[in-house]
Image (spheres, rainbow, N blue to C red):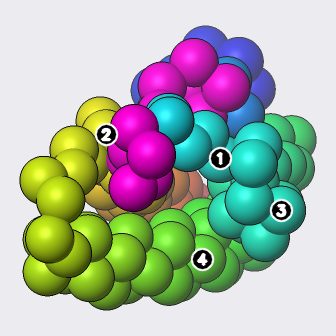
């Protein structure tokens, strides 16, 4: 169902995780070169998996429970990415040269926020369907 609000949130997650890593850098390395997600294979695979899970979740609108579970798995994947980025940023700040953390390190944070909003909307839909079933 395209008209539902959780579809909008899931499309935002797919765009954030699929397109934004190509446009913004994650951090600057010791030589001052920008490091993008496409330069590190497993980070790019994790971000594209997150975008794919969001797209798969959009088309699971008939089974709200499975959609909810897929979104939870996507949140766990983004939490692992966020944990790695925090670990990496703590290691970057300990070097002798001053390095810059990029805005791309916040991609998992935005994804998690929109996934939580989507799950709240899915839960609201599920509660509405259950309340209508009680009236029958």
Q: As drawn, is 77 to the left or to the right of 80?
A: right
> Neighbour class for label 1 at 10 Å: few (<14), some, many (≥20)?
many
Please tell me the numbered disc located at residue 37. 1
Please give the name of the residue rendered at 75% of the width and 48% of the height, measured from the top-left corner. Answer: 39
Distance, label 1 to label 4, CA atoms, is: 15 Å
State the residue in front, 97 or 133: 97
Left or right of 22? Residue 126 is left
From the image, tell me which residue sits under label 2.
102
Q: Residues within 10 Å of mark 3 (few under 14, many from 20)?
A: few
In depth, the one of 112 and 125 nearer the eye is 112
Q: CA distance from mark 1 to mark 3?
A: 8 Å
Dot 2 crowding, Cα within 10 Å, few <14, some 14–19, many 20+: some
Give above or below for 19 relative to 32.
Answer: above
- Is residue 135 at all visible to an observer of this figure? no
Marks 2 and 1 close (CB-CB < 8 Å):
no
Residue at point 14% right, 71% down?
96
Q: Are marks 1 and 3 in contact (CB under 8 Å)?
A: no
Secondary structure of the residue carrying numbered label 1: helix
**Residue 125: % across, % down:** 47, 50
Frontmost of labels 4 and 3 is: 3
Q: Which residues are magenta?
A: 20-32
Closest to the camera, between mark 4 and mark 2, is 2
Which of the 4 image quarters holds residue 93?
bottom left
Looking at the rendered image, the disc whose residue lies closer to the viewer, 1 or 4, is: 1
Q: Tell me the residue that label 4 is attached to.
A: 77
Label 2: state its secondary structure: loop
**Could you tell me which secondary element the residue under label 3 belongs to?**
helix
Badge 4 marks a residue whose secondary structure is helix
> Which label was assigned to residue 41?
3
Q: Position of residue 114 (x, y in %)?
A: 38, 44
Work out whether mark 4 precedes mark 2 in sequence or the reverse, and give the earlier one: 4
**Cα separation between marks 2 and 3:** 18 Å
């Amino acid at each position: 169902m395209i008209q539902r609000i959780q579809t909008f949130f899931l499309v935002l997650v797919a765009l954030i995780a699929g397109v934004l890593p190509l446009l913004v850098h994650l951090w600057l390395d010791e030589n001052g070169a920008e490091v993008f997600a496409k330069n590190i294979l497993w980070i790019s695979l994790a971000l594209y998996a997150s975008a794919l899970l969001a797209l798969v979740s959009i088309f699971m609108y008939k089974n709200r429970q499975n959609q909810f579970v897929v979104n939870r798995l996507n949140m766990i994947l983004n939490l692992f990415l966020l944990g790695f980025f925090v670990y990496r940023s703590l290691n970057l700040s300990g070097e002798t040269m001053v390095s810059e953390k990029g805005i791309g390190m916040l991609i998992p944070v935005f994804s998690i926020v929109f996934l939580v909003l989507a799950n709240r909307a899915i839960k609201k839909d599920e509660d509405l369907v259950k309340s209508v079933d009680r009236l029958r």
